[in-house]
Amino acid sequence: MPDAGANSSNDGAHKTDVIIIGGGPVGLFAVFELGLLGLSAHVVDILDRPGGQCAELYPEKVILDIPSRLKITGAELCNELMAQIAPFNPTFHFQQMAEKLEKLETGHWRIATDIGTVIEAPVVVIAGGGGSFMPKKPKLDRLEEFEGKSLFYAVRRMDQFRGLNVLIAGGGDSALDWTVNLSPFVAGMSLVHRRNEFRGMQVTVDQMYALVNTGKVNLAIGDILRLNGEGGQLKSVTLKSTEKGEFDVACDAMLAFYGLTMKLGPIANWGLNMDTNRVAVSTETFETSTPGIFCIGDMCHYPGKLKLILSGFHESALMAHACFHYARPNQKLRFEHTTSSSAIQAKLGVP
């Protein structure tokens, strides 16, 4: 789903009923619960795909406590949640961090992301799990000199690298995926890893080696010692290996994929009541100390809180009903069961 909204204001801001910060399983299920009540949602996530921790940290790990499923992998759960919310046509803003929060004179909220996307809604829902995923940075001199100019930690626009000589550093899924996906667009592609063993899915590893064998990817094994270039523009990276000693690999741009770490991020500065680095909420509505801002999933805190996907699903349902009164202040909420409501069944395409 594209980074665009059907409803936008003249100043370019997207308009929706609810802004959800976090696209993990709980954020995705929140889209479903809101959709049942006729509420639209835009979802902001720093990752490049839906699924949050499930997709990024354990896509193939089996989860055993999802009701009615004897077992389900993180990837399967996310795929099925995406299929479940498809009838509600949510808008996703991937690879973006919700950075600024502003209360408008209308009483609505305005969120601005770190790349300038602006979204307005009467309700904000924080569903960011343990916080925002932040890239782990290599311990190299002159790192800041190149960051954001020719050294990046994510691919936000593939066209940005078209025709360049690109070096990708890392050995996991992200490094392998982008090596394969960017190779048709770039002038040259090098993949750098400290050893000739990779942590990604075998099918992607095989695709990468196929590109190496045809000369479309240069695989360089070694530890990165130095970044070389001037004025923020990389020219090469110096590696060291047991077999070759020190050697340079030329590049115009470098993508570093060394994994992710969790940080609370800008939300910590939004003036919400915090409890042990988590957002305190009411268990009746899952509203925070700030009216119109809700929190569900691992990031919320209340007595007896269990950090389970199952708990987040329950929180999503109560939150959605409380959100309705902000989004539709002049309408009465009509509670309906999916088993008996023909209107809901029609929304979901159930014959």
Image (cartoon, rainbow, N blue to C red):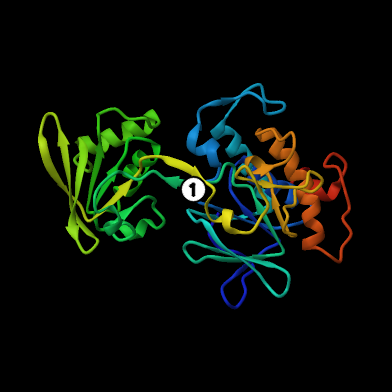
Left or right for 331, reference 244: right
**73 or 233: nearer the viewer:** 233
**93 or 267: nearer the viewer:** 267
Left or right for 149, reference 327: left
Number of residue marks:
1
Left or right for 88, reference 201: right
Question: Is residue 156 something one can see in this rendering?
Answer: yes
Residue designated by label 1: 47
**57 or 86: nearer the viewer:** 57
Q: Where's residue 239, x and y in %?
A: 17, 40
130 to 273, vertically: above or below: above
Residue drawn at the location 72% of the way across and 64% of the way down:
122
Q: Where's residue 203, x and y in %?
A: 38, 31
Q: Where's residue 70, x and y in %?
A: 66, 21
Left or right for 245, reference 304: left
Instruction: For label 1, count other residues whose C-alpha is less than 10 Å away and answer few (under 14), some (14-19) or many (20+).
Output: many
265 to 329, vertically: above or below: above
> What amino acid does circle 1 point to?
Leu
Q: In which quarter of the image is residue 303?
A: top right
Element assignment for label 1: loop
Quadrant assignment for the C terminus:
top right
Residue drawn at the location 32% of the way across and 56% of the way down:
147
63 to 275, vertically: above or below: above
Q: Where's residue 210, x and y in %?
A: 26, 34
**267 or 259: nearer the viewer:** 267
Q: Residue furthest top?
A: 70
Q: In which quarter of the image is residue 38?
A: bottom right
Q: Which residue lies furthest to the bottom in this view?
A: 10
